[in-house]
Image (cartoon, rainbow, N blue to C red):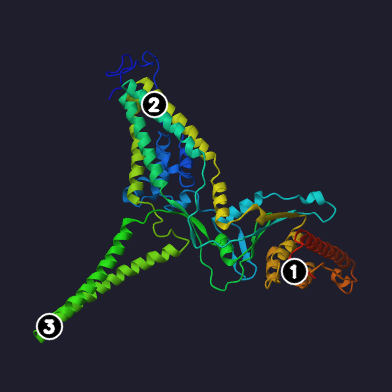
Protein backbone atom coordinates (compact mmCIF):
# COMPACT_ATOMS: atom_id res chain seq x y z
CA UNK A 1 0.00 0.00 0.00
CA UNK A 2 1.56 3.34 -1.02
CA UNK A 3 1.96 6.06 1.60
CA UNK A 4 -0.75 8.67 1.93
CA UNK A 5 -0.27 11.66 -0.31
CA UNK A 6 0.88 14.58 1.83
CA UNK A 7 0.13 17.37 -0.62
CA UNK A 8 -3.60 17.58 0.12
CA UNK A 9 -5.77 17.40 3.20
CA UNK A 10 -7.44 14.16 4.16
CA UNK A 11 -11.16 13.76 3.52
CA UNK A 12 -13.15 14.54 6.63
CA UNK A 13 -10.38 16.56 8.32
CA UNK A 14 -11.71 19.00 10.90
CA UNK A 15 -8.62 21.24 10.88
CA UNK A 16 -5.96 21.88 8.29
CA UNK A 17 -2.84 19.75 8.61
CA UNK A 18 -0.10 22.14 9.87
CA UNK A 19 2.59 20.07 8.12
CA UNK A 20 0.67 19.71 4.87
CA UNK A 21 3.32 21.34 2.69
CA UNK A 22 6.41 20.02 4.50
CA UNK A 23 9.09 18.73 2.13
CA UNK A 24 10.49 15.91 4.27
CA UNK A 25 9.24 12.48 5.39
CA UNK A 26 9.94 10.06 8.23
CA UNK A 27 11.60 6.71 7.61
CA UNK A 28 9.35 3.94 8.94
CA UNK A 29 12.21 1.77 10.15
CA UNK A 30 13.69 4.76 11.95
CA UNK A 31 10.37 5.51 13.63
CA UNK A 32 9.94 1.89 14.75
CA UNK A 33 13.44 1.63 16.21
CA UNK A 34 13.90 5.21 17.34
CA UNK A 35 13.93 4.29 21.00
CA UNK A 36 15.26 1.12 22.62
CA UNK A 37 13.24 -1.30 24.68
CA UNK A 38 15.56 -1.75 27.67
CA UNK A 39 13.99 1.11 29.59
CA UNK A 40 10.51 -0.21 28.80
CA UNK A 41 11.42 -3.66 30.14
CA UNK A 42 12.88 -2.26 33.36
CA UNK A 43 9.97 0.12 33.72
CA UNK A 44 7.52 -2.78 33.44
CA UNK A 45 9.39 -4.54 36.28
CA UNK A 46 8.02 -1.96 38.73
CA UNK A 47 4.41 -2.85 37.97
CA UNK A 48 4.05 -4.97 41.12
CA UNK A 49 5.93 -2.72 43.53
CA UNK A 50 3.80 0.42 43.60
CA UNK A 51 0.23 0.91 44.60
CA UNK A 52 -1.92 1.57 41.53
CA UNK A 53 0.95 1.09 39.07
CA UNK A 54 -0.93 -1.61 37.11
CA UNK A 55 -3.56 0.92 36.09
CA UNK A 56 -1.07 3.38 34.59
CA UNK A 57 -0.11 1.61 31.38
CA UNK A 58 -2.54 3.14 28.88
CA UNK A 59 0.08 4.88 26.77
CA UNK A 60 1.89 4.11 23.54
CA UNK A 61 5.32 2.90 24.55
CA UNK A 62 8.41 1.90 22.61
CA UNK A 63 10.04 -1.51 23.04
CA UNK A 64 6.84 -3.55 22.79
CA UNK A 65 8.75 -6.44 21.21
CA UNK A 66 11.32 -6.43 24.01
CA UNK A 67 8.55 -6.49 26.62
CA UNK A 68 6.89 -9.41 24.85
CA UNK A 69 10.16 -11.35 24.63
CA UNK A 70 10.93 -10.75 28.31
CA UNK A 71 7.58 -11.47 29.92
CA UNK A 72 6.06 -13.74 27.29
CA UNK A 73 8.09 -16.54 28.87
CA UNK A 74 5.50 -16.65 31.64
CA UNK A 75 2.87 -17.99 29.26
CA UNK A 76 2.79 -21.76 29.47
CA UNK A 77 1.69 -22.20 25.87
CA UNK A 78 3.43 -23.92 22.98
CA UNK A 79 3.04 -20.91 20.68
CA UNK A 80 4.62 -18.56 23.22
CA UNK A 81 7.41 -21.04 23.98
CA UNK A 82 8.22 -21.00 20.27
CA UNK A 83 8.00 -17.23 19.92
CA UNK A 84 9.89 -16.44 23.13
CA UNK A 85 12.29 -19.34 23.83
CA UNK A 86 14.66 -19.59 26.77
CA UNK A 87 14.65 -17.58 29.94
CA UNK A 88 12.74 -18.39 33.10
CA UNK A 89 9.06 -18.82 33.86
CA UNK A 90 9.33 -17.73 37.49
CA UNK A 91 7.59 -14.34 37.88
CA UNK A 92 9.59 -13.43 40.99
CA UNK A 93 12.87 -13.72 39.09
CA UNK A 94 11.61 -11.91 36.00
CA UNK A 95 10.47 -8.97 38.14
CA UNK A 96 13.68 -8.92 40.19
CA UNK A 97 12.08 -10.18 43.42
CA UNK A 98 14.32 -13.23 43.63
CA UNK A 99 17.57 -14.52 42.19
CA UNK A 100 20.29 -12.76 44.16
CA UNK A 101 22.70 -14.84 46.25
CA UNK A 102 23.18 -13.76 49.83
CA UNK A 103 26.24 -14.19 52.11
CA UNK A 104 27.13 -17.33 54.03
CA UNK A 105 25.30 -17.84 57.30
CA UNK A 106 26.34 -19.68 60.46
CA UNK A 107 23.81 -20.20 63.25
CA UNK A 108 25.42 -19.53 66.63
CA UNK A 109 23.36 -21.89 68.78
CA UNK A 110 21.94 -24.56 66.50
CA UNK A 111 25.15 -24.97 64.50
CA UNK A 112 23.33 -24.81 61.13
CA UNK A 113 25.41 -23.57 58.22
CA UNK A 114 24.25 -22.15 54.90
CA UNK A 115 27.04 -21.75 52.36
CA UNK A 116 24.82 -19.33 50.49
CA UNK A 117 21.54 -17.64 51.31
CA UNK A 118 18.85 -16.08 49.18
CA UNK A 119 17.54 -12.79 47.92
CA UNK A 120 16.33 -11.45 51.27
CA UNK A 121 19.72 -12.02 52.90
CA UNK A 122 21.30 -10.17 49.97
CA UNK A 123 18.96 -7.24 50.64
CA UNK A 124 19.94 -7.31 54.31
CA UNK A 125 23.65 -7.31 53.43
CA UNK A 126 23.08 -4.41 51.06
CA UNK A 127 21.33 -2.47 53.81
CA UNK A 128 24.15 -3.25 56.24
CA UNK A 129 26.76 -1.96 53.80
CA UNK A 130 24.93 1.35 53.61
CA UNK A 131 24.42 1.71 57.36
CA UNK A 132 26.34 4.65 58.87
CA UNK A 133 29.20 4.09 61.30
CA UNK A 134 32.14 5.91 62.85
CA UNK A 135 35.43 5.23 61.10
CA UNK A 136 38.10 3.46 63.11
CA UNK A 137 40.65 6.00 61.91
CA UNK A 138 39.05 8.61 64.18
CA UNK A 139 40.26 6.54 67.12
CA UNK A 140 43.67 5.89 65.66
CA UNK A 141 46.17 5.02 68.38
CA UNK A 142 43.62 3.28 70.61
CA UNK A 143 43.70 0.04 68.63
CA UNK A 144 45.81 -1.60 65.99
CA UNK A 145 44.84 -0.96 62.35
CA UNK A 146 45.75 -3.39 59.59
CA UNK A 147 42.70 -4.36 57.54
CA UNK A 148 39.61 -2.49 58.76
CA UNK A 149 36.48 -4.61 59.05
CA UNK A 150 32.93 -3.86 60.15
CA UNK A 151 30.38 -5.67 62.25
CA UNK A 152 26.70 -4.79 61.93
CA UNK A 153 24.44 -5.90 64.77
CA UNK A 154 20.78 -6.26 63.89
CA UNK A 155 18.19 -7.08 66.54
CA UNK A 156 15.06 -8.61 65.04
CA UNK A 157 12.13 -7.68 67.30
CA UNK A 158 9.37 -9.56 65.50
CA UNK A 159 8.73 -13.02 64.06
CA UNK A 160 6.45 -12.67 61.02
CA UNK A 161 3.78 -15.23 60.10
CA UNK A 162 4.50 -17.92 57.53
CA UNK A 163 2.88 -15.91 54.75
CA UNK A 164 2.48 -12.13 54.63
CA UNK A 165 1.00 -9.92 51.93
CA UNK A 166 2.51 -6.53 52.74
CA UNK A 167 0.88 -3.28 51.80
CA UNK A 168 2.55 -1.79 48.77
CA UNK A 169 4.14 1.62 49.25
CA UNK A 170 2.77 4.67 47.52
CA UNK A 171 4.94 6.28 44.87
CA UNK A 172 4.26 9.45 42.92
CA UNK A 173 5.30 7.63 39.74
CA UNK A 174 1.75 6.28 39.58
CA UNK A 175 0.50 9.86 39.20
CA UNK A 176 3.23 10.70 36.70
CA UNK A 177 1.73 8.05 34.43
CA UNK A 178 -0.90 10.64 33.50
CA UNK A 179 1.81 12.48 31.53
CA UNK A 180 2.40 9.76 28.88
CA UNK A 181 -1.28 8.78 29.01
CA UNK A 182 -2.28 12.38 28.34
CA UNK A 183 0.30 12.67 25.56
CA UNK A 184 -1.04 9.54 23.85
CA UNK A 185 -4.65 10.68 24.16
CA UNK A 186 -3.74 14.14 22.89
CA UNK A 187 -1.89 12.64 19.93
CA UNK A 188 -4.93 10.50 19.11
CA UNK A 189 -7.15 13.59 19.18
CA UNK A 190 -4.70 15.48 16.96
CA UNK A 191 -4.59 12.65 14.43
CA UNK A 192 -8.39 12.45 14.43
CA UNK A 193 -8.69 16.19 13.76
CA UNK A 194 -6.58 15.88 10.61
CA UNK A 195 -8.36 12.59 9.70
CA UNK A 196 -5.13 10.57 9.88
CA UNK A 197 -6.73 7.31 10.93
CA UNK A 198 -3.58 5.28 10.26
CA UNK A 199 -1.58 7.11 12.91
CA UNK A 200 -4.65 7.27 15.14
CA UNK A 201 -5.01 3.47 15.00
CA UNK A 202 -1.31 2.87 15.62
CA UNK A 203 -1.25 5.03 18.73
CA UNK A 204 -4.50 3.55 20.00
CA UNK A 205 -3.17 0.02 19.44
CA UNK A 206 -0.04 0.85 21.43
CA UNK A 207 -2.12 2.23 24.29
CA UNK A 208 -4.35 -0.83 24.37
CA UNK A 209 -1.49 -3.35 24.16
CA UNK A 210 0.64 -1.74 26.86
CA UNK A 211 -2.39 -1.14 29.10
CA UNK A 212 -3.40 -4.81 28.89
CA UNK A 213 0.18 -5.95 29.60
CA UNK A 214 0.46 -3.71 32.67
CA UNK A 215 -2.91 -4.84 33.99
CA UNK A 216 -2.24 -8.57 33.52
CA UNK A 217 1.39 -8.57 34.71
CA UNK A 218 0.53 -6.25 37.60
CA UNK A 219 -2.30 -8.45 38.85
CA UNK A 220 0.15 -10.40 41.03
CA UNK A 221 0.07 -9.70 44.76
CA UNK A 222 3.50 -9.26 46.33
CA UNK A 223 3.75 -11.93 49.03
CA UNK A 224 6.38 -12.94 51.56
CA UNK A 225 6.80 -16.55 52.68
CA UNK A 226 9.20 -18.50 54.87
CA UNK A 227 9.46 -21.86 56.57
CA UNK A 228 7.87 -22.32 59.97
CA UNK A 229 10.56 -23.20 62.55
CA UNK A 230 10.25 -26.37 64.58
CA UNK A 231 8.70 -26.08 68.01
CA UNK A 232 11.26 -25.67 70.77
CA UNK A 233 13.94 -24.44 68.36
CA UNK A 234 16.75 -22.38 69.98
CA UNK A 235 17.16 -18.67 69.20
CA UNK A 236 18.19 -18.10 65.64
CA UNK A 237 21.16 -15.83 66.44
CA UNK A 238 23.85 -16.11 63.82
CA UNK A 239 26.40 -14.45 61.59
CA UNK A 240 26.30 -13.49 57.92
CA UNK A 241 29.85 -13.34 56.66
CA UNK A 242 30.70 -10.86 53.93
CA UNK A 243 33.81 -9.63 52.17
CA UNK A 244 34.63 -6.70 54.46
CA UNK A 245 32.87 -7.69 57.65
CA UNK A 246 30.06 -9.64 59.24
CA UNK A 247 26.42 -9.11 60.14
CA UNK A 248 25.23 -10.36 63.51
CA UNK A 249 21.50 -11.04 63.65
CA UNK A 250 19.84 -11.63 67.00
CA UNK A 251 16.26 -12.74 67.42
CA UNK A 252 13.85 -15.64 67.41
CA UNK A 253 14.26 -18.60 65.11
CA UNK A 254 11.28 -17.48 63.04
CA UNK A 255 12.69 -13.97 62.57
CA UNK A 256 16.14 -15.15 61.48
CA UNK A 257 14.61 -17.94 59.42
CA UNK A 258 12.69 -15.32 57.47
CA UNK A 259 16.01 -13.91 56.28
CA UNK A 260 17.85 -17.15 55.63
CA UNK A 261 15.05 -19.16 54.01
CA UNK A 262 12.32 -16.65 53.19
CA UNK A 263 11.50 -15.21 49.80
CA UNK A 264 9.27 -12.84 47.88
CA UNK A 265 6.94 -14.11 45.20
CA UNK A 266 3.97 -12.86 43.22
CA UNK A 267 0.65 -14.40 44.21
CA UNK A 268 -1.70 -14.54 41.24
CA UNK A 269 -5.23 -15.86 41.27
CA UNK A 270 -5.48 -19.64 41.34
CA UNK A 271 -5.67 -21.05 37.80
CA UNK A 272 -8.96 -22.47 36.61
CA UNK A 273 -7.38 -25.92 36.22
CA UNK A 274 -6.84 -26.13 39.97
CA UNK A 275 -10.47 -25.20 40.60
CA UNK A 276 -11.64 -27.82 38.14
CA UNK A 277 -9.47 -30.46 39.79
CA UNK A 278 -10.79 -29.66 43.24
CA UNK A 279 -14.34 -29.72 41.91
CA UNK A 280 -13.70 -33.07 40.29
CA UNK A 281 -12.45 -34.52 43.56
CA UNK A 282 -15.54 -33.28 45.37
CA UNK A 283 -17.75 -34.57 42.56
CA UNK A 284 -16.19 -38.02 42.76
CA UNK A 285 -16.66 -38.07 46.51
CA UNK A 286 -20.31 -37.10 46.11
CA UNK A 287 -20.72 -39.77 43.48
CA UNK A 288 -19.26 -42.38 45.80
CA UNK A 289 -21.64 -41.36 48.56
CA UNK A 290 -24.63 -41.47 46.21
CA UNK A 291 -23.54 -44.89 44.93
CA UNK A 292 -23.32 -46.22 48.46
CA UNK A 293 -26.75 -44.85 49.28
CA UNK A 294 -28.16 -46.40 46.10
CA UNK A 295 -26.78 -49.81 47.05
CA UNK A 296 -28.27 -49.50 50.50
CA UNK A 297 -31.71 -48.61 49.10
CA UNK A 298 -31.95 -51.46 46.55
CA UNK A 299 -34.93 -53.77 47.18
CA UNK A 300 -33.88 -57.30 48.12
CA UNK A 301 -36.04 -59.44 45.75
CA UNK A 302 -33.61 -62.03 44.50
CA UNK A 303 -30.36 -62.98 46.19
CA UNK A 304 -28.47 -63.85 42.98
CA UNK A 305 -29.58 -60.70 41.18
CA UNK A 306 -28.80 -58.63 44.24
CA UNK A 307 -25.34 -60.15 44.46
CA UNK A 308 -24.55 -59.39 40.81
CA UNK A 309 -25.71 -55.83 41.20
CA UNK A 310 -23.68 -55.38 44.36
CA UNK A 311 -20.63 -56.80 42.60
CA UNK A 312 -21.08 -54.44 39.64
CA UNK A 313 -21.63 -51.43 41.89
CA UNK A 314 -18.64 -52.47 43.97
CA UNK A 315 -16.39 -52.60 40.88
CA UNK A 316 -17.59 -49.18 39.76
CA UNK A 317 -17.06 -47.81 43.22
CA UNK A 318 -13.51 -49.22 43.30
CA UNK A 319 -12.69 -47.56 39.97
CA UNK A 320 -14.11 -44.25 41.20
CA UNK A 321 -12.13 -44.52 44.42
CA UNK A 322 -8.96 -45.20 42.43
CA UNK A 323 -9.58 -42.20 40.19
CA UNK A 324 -10.42 -40.00 43.18
CA UNK A 325 -7.28 -41.20 44.93
CA UNK A 326 -5.15 -40.29 41.92
CA UNK A 327 -6.67 -36.82 41.71
CA UNK A 328 -6.32 -36.32 45.45
CA UNK A 329 -2.66 -37.36 45.23
CA UNK A 330 -2.04 -34.79 42.49
CA UNK A 331 -3.76 -32.14 44.62
CA UNK A 332 -1.59 -33.08 47.61
CA UNK A 333 1.53 -32.82 45.46
CA UNK A 334 0.52 -29.33 44.35
CA UNK A 335 -0.18 -28.40 47.95
CA UNK A 336 3.23 -29.69 48.98
CA UNK A 337 4.88 -27.57 46.31
CA UNK A 338 2.80 -24.63 47.49
CA UNK A 339 4.26 -25.01 50.99
CA UNK A 340 7.79 -25.17 49.60
CA UNK A 341 9.44 -21.76 49.43
CA UNK A 342 11.63 -22.87 46.53
CA UNK A 343 8.60 -23.05 44.22
CA UNK A 344 5.69 -20.74 43.58
CA UNK A 345 2.70 -21.53 45.79
CA UNK A 346 -0.83 -22.28 44.65
CA UNK A 347 -1.82 -19.53 42.25
CA UNK A 348 1.79 -18.41 41.99
CA UNK A 349 1.72 -18.44 38.18
CA UNK A 350 -0.18 -15.84 36.16
CA UNK A 351 -2.94 -16.80 33.77
CA UNK A 352 -1.13 -18.38 30.83
CA UNK A 353 -3.82 -17.46 28.30
CA UNK A 354 -3.87 -13.79 29.32
CA UNK A 355 -0.06 -13.55 29.33
CA UNK A 356 0.17 -15.25 25.95
CA UNK A 357 -2.51 -12.98 24.51
CA UNK A 358 -0.74 -9.86 25.79
CA UNK A 359 2.62 -11.04 24.44
CA UNK A 360 1.17 -11.76 21.00
CA UNK A 361 -0.63 -8.41 21.08
CA UNK A 362 2.63 -6.59 21.89
CA UNK A 363 4.38 -8.41 19.06
CA UNK A 364 1.55 -7.54 16.70
CA UNK A 365 1.82 -3.93 17.81
CA UNK A 366 5.47 -3.82 16.81
CA UNK A 367 4.79 -5.35 13.39
CA UNK A 368 1.69 -3.28 12.67
CA UNK A 369 3.34 -0.02 13.65
CA UNK A 370 6.41 -0.88 11.60
CA UNK A 371 4.29 -1.38 8.49
CA UNK A 372 1.50 1.14 8.92
CA UNK A 373 3.18 4.21 10.38
CA UNK A 374 4.39 5.29 6.87
CA UNK A 375 0.78 5.23 5.67
CA UNK A 376 -0.08 8.21 7.87
CA UNK A 377 0.45 11.85 7.05
CA UNK A 378 3.53 13.63 8.31
CA UNK A 379 1.66 15.33 11.13
CA UNK A 380 0.35 11.96 12.36
CA UNK A 381 3.82 10.44 12.17
CA UNK A 382 5.20 13.29 14.24
CA UNK A 383 2.42 12.76 16.79
CA UNK A 384 3.31 9.07 16.90
CA UNK A 385 6.99 9.81 17.52
CA UNK A 386 6.07 12.35 20.21
CA UNK A 387 4.12 9.71 22.12
CA UNK A 388 7.14 7.42 21.99
CA UNK A 389 9.41 10.22 23.20
CA UNK A 390 7.19 11.06 26.19
CA UNK A 391 6.72 7.38 27.05
CA UNK A 392 10.45 6.77 26.76
CA UNK A 393 11.07 9.57 29.24
CA UNK A 394 8.57 8.08 31.67
CA UNK A 395 10.05 4.59 31.27
CA UNK A 396 13.51 6.03 31.89
CA UNK A 397 12.26 7.52 35.12
CA UNK A 398 10.77 4.18 36.18
CA UNK A 399 14.04 2.44 35.34
CA UNK A 400 15.96 4.87 37.54
CA UNK A 401 13.95 3.84 40.62
CA UNK A 402 15.92 1.40 42.75
CA UNK A 403 13.66 -1.62 43.09
CA UNK A 404 15.91 -3.19 45.71
CA UNK A 405 15.45 -0.16 47.95
CA UNK A 406 11.70 -0.63 47.75
CA UNK A 407 12.01 -4.34 48.51
CA UNK A 408 14.26 -3.57 51.47
CA UNK A 409 11.71 -1.14 52.89
CA UNK A 410 8.97 -3.73 52.48
CA UNK A 411 11.15 -6.35 54.19
CA UNK A 412 11.87 -4.02 57.11
CA UNK A 413 8.15 -3.35 57.46
CA UNK A 414 7.43 -7.10 57.53
CA UNK A 415 10.09 -7.67 60.20
CA UNK A 416 9.20 -4.41 61.99
CA UNK A 417 12.86 -3.50 61.71
CA UNK A 418 13.72 0.12 62.47
CA UNK A 419 16.91 2.17 62.48
CA UNK A 420 17.25 1.82 66.24
CA UNK A 421 17.58 -1.96 65.80
CA UNK A 422 20.68 -1.61 63.60
CA UNK A 423 24.12 -0.62 64.84
CA UNK A 424 27.37 -0.77 62.92
CA UNK A 425 30.97 -0.64 64.16
CA UNK A 426 34.34 -0.58 62.42
CA UNK A 427 37.51 -2.15 63.79
CA UNK A 428 41.10 -1.93 62.73
CA UNK A 429 41.61 -5.67 62.45
CA UNK A 430 39.52 -8.67 61.54
CA UNK A 431 40.55 -10.20 64.87
CA UNK A 432 38.99 -7.44 66.96
CA UNK A 433 35.90 -7.49 64.78
CA UNK A 434 35.48 -11.26 65.24
CA UNK A 435 35.74 -11.04 69.04
CA UNK A 436 33.22 -8.20 69.13
CA UNK A 437 30.82 -10.27 66.98
CA UNK A 438 31.16 -13.28 69.32
CA UNK A 439 30.48 -11.10 72.35
CA UNK A 440 27.41 -9.67 70.64
CA UNK A 441 26.10 -13.19 70.07
CA UNK A 442 26.05 -14.06 73.79
CA UNK A 443 24.28 -11.27 75.64
CA UNK A 444 22.71 -13.69 78.15
CA UNK A 445 24.23 -17.16 77.83
CA UNK A 446 27.64 -18.34 76.63
CA UNK A 447 27.71 -19.70 73.12
CA UNK A 448 27.81 -23.50 72.93
CA UNK A 449 29.57 -23.32 69.55
CA UNK A 450 31.91 -20.38 70.07
CA UNK A 451 35.05 -22.37 69.02
CA UNK A 452 33.31 -23.39 65.81
CA UNK A 453 32.32 -19.82 64.99
CA UNK A 454 35.79 -18.53 65.86
CA UNK A 455 37.37 -21.10 63.56
CA UNK A 456 34.97 -20.12 60.81
CA UNK A 457 35.79 -16.42 61.10
CA UNK A 458 39.51 -16.97 61.65
CA UNK A 459 40.59 -20.25 60.03
CA UNK A 460 44.30 -19.74 60.90
CA UNK A 461 45.70 -22.80 62.70
CA UNK A 462 49.35 -21.98 63.40
CA UNK A 463 50.88 -22.28 66.86
CA UNK A 464 50.22 -18.63 67.67
CA UNK A 465 46.61 -18.74 66.55
CA UNK A 466 45.96 -22.05 68.29
CA UNK A 467 47.09 -20.66 71.65
CA UNK A 468 45.22 -17.41 71.15
CA UNK A 469 42.02 -19.30 70.34
CA UNK A 470 42.43 -21.43 73.45
CA UNK A 471 42.67 -18.27 75.52
CA UNK A 472 39.60 -16.80 73.81
CA UNK A 473 37.55 -19.92 74.47
CA UNK A 474 38.19 -19.48 78.19
CA UNK A 475 37.42 -15.76 78.13
CA UNK A 476 34.19 -16.14 76.23
CA UNK A 477 32.57 -17.80 79.22
CA UNK A 478 33.43 -14.96 81.61
CA UNK A 479 31.88 -11.56 82.20
CA UNK A 480 33.35 -8.21 83.02
CA UNK A 481 36.70 -6.84 81.96
CA UNK A 482 39.16 -9.34 80.57
CA UNK A 483 42.47 -9.73 82.38
CA UNK A 484 45.42 -11.49 80.77
CA UNK A 485 48.32 -13.01 82.68
CA UNK A 486 51.96 -13.23 81.71
CA UNK A 487 51.46 -16.88 80.87
CA UNK A 488 48.75 -15.87 78.41
CA UNK A 489 51.11 -13.47 76.71
CA UNK A 490 53.93 -15.97 76.53
CA UNK A 491 53.92 -18.38 73.59
CA UNK A 492 56.32 -20.99 74.97
CA UNK A 493 57.64 -21.72 78.41
CA UNK A 494 61.17 -22.29 77.11
CA UNK A 495 62.84 -20.23 74.42
CA UNK A 496 64.57 -22.12 71.58
CA UNK A 497 68.36 -22.15 71.46
CA UNK A 498 68.71 -21.98 67.69
CA UNK A 499 69.16 -18.43 66.44
CA UNK A 500 66.73 -18.78 63.53
CA UNK A 501 64.09 -20.47 65.65
CA UNK A 502 64.53 -17.80 68.30
CA UNK A 503 63.92 -15.07 65.71
CA UNK A 504 60.77 -16.82 64.50
CA UNK A 505 59.61 -17.35 68.06
CA UNK A 506 60.10 -13.67 68.86
CA UNK A 507 57.98 -12.70 65.86
CA UNK A 508 55.28 -15.17 66.88
CA UNK A 509 55.43 -13.86 70.43
CA UNK A 510 54.93 -10.34 69.15
CA UNK A 511 51.94 -11.46 67.09
CA UNK A 512 50.38 -13.21 70.09
CA UNK A 513 50.63 -10.05 72.18
CA UNK A 514 49.08 -8.04 69.34
CA UNK A 515 46.19 -10.50 69.02
CA UNK A 516 45.56 -10.36 72.77
CA UNK A 517 45.50 -6.57 72.64
CA UNK A 518 43.00 -6.73 69.78
CA UNK A 519 40.74 -8.99 71.84
CA UNK A 520 41.07 -6.73 74.87
CA UNK A 521 40.19 -3.67 72.79
CA UNK A 522 37.13 -5.46 71.38
CA UNK A 523 35.98 -6.43 74.88
CA UNK A 524 36.39 -2.89 76.17
CA UNK A 525 34.51 -1.46 73.24
CA UNK A 526 31.67 -3.94 73.65
CA UNK A 527 31.37 -3.02 77.33
CA UNK A 528 31.26 0.63 76.33
CA UNK A 529 28.67 0.24 73.57
CA UNK A 530 26.46 -2.24 75.45
CA UNK A 531 26.81 -1.31 79.14
CA UNK A 532 23.43 -2.85 80.05
CA UNK A 533 24.18 -6.26 78.62
CA UNK A 534 23.42 -8.96 81.25
CA UNK A 535 26.65 -10.76 80.43
CA UNK A 536 28.65 -7.71 81.51
CA UNK A 537 27.28 -7.65 85.03
CA UNK A 538 29.80 -8.77 87.60
Report which quarter residue 431 is drawn in: bottom right
Is residue 461 at least partly visible in the picture? no
Q: Quadrant of the N terminus?
A: top left
Report which residue position mark 1 lands on: 535
Q: Along the line of sight, which residue is nearer the eye, 465 or 354?
A: 354
Going by the image, does 322 lie left or right of 306? right
- In percent of width and height, residue 19 lies at 39, 16
Q: How many marks?
A: 3
Q: CA distance from mark 2 to mark 3?
A: 80 Å
Residue 315: image location, x then y, percent? 20, 77
Nearest-to-viewer mark from 2 and 1: 1
What element does badge 1 sit on?
helix
Instruction: Specify which label sits upstream in the sequence, 2 or 3.
Output: 2
Asked if the residue at tag 3 contacts the one at tag 2, i.e. Cβ–Cβ closer than 8 Å, the answer is no
Quadrant in which the C terminus is drawn: bottom right
Closest to the observer: 46 or 244?
46
Circle 2 — which element? helix
Q: Nearer the viewer, residue 30 or 287?
A: 287
Reading the image, the residue beneath label 2 is 187
**Callout 3 crowding tier (Cα within 10 Å): few <14, some 14–19, many ≥20:** some
- Residue lying at the far bottom of the rendered structure: 303
- From what the image shows, is residue 204 above or below residue 96? above
- Taking the spot 36% from the left edge, 47% from the top edge, the residue there is 355
Res. 337 in view = yes
Q: Which residue is mark 3?
A: 306
Amino acid sequence: MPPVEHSRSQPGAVVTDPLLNANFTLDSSGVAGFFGGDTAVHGMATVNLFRGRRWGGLYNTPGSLEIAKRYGQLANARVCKGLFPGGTDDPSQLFGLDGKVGPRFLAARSGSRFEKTGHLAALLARMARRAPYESVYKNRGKERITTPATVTIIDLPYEPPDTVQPELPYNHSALLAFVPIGASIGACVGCALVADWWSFSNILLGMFANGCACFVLGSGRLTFKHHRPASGAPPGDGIFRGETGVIVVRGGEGAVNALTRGRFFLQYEAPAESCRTQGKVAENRDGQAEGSQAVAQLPRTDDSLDGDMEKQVGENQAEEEQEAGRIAKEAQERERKARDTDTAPQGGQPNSFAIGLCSILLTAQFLVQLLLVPQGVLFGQVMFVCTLAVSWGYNTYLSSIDREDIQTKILCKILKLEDKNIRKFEFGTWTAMSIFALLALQPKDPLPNSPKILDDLLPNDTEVWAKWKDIMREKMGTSGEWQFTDDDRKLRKQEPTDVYEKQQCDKAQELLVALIEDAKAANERFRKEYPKSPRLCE
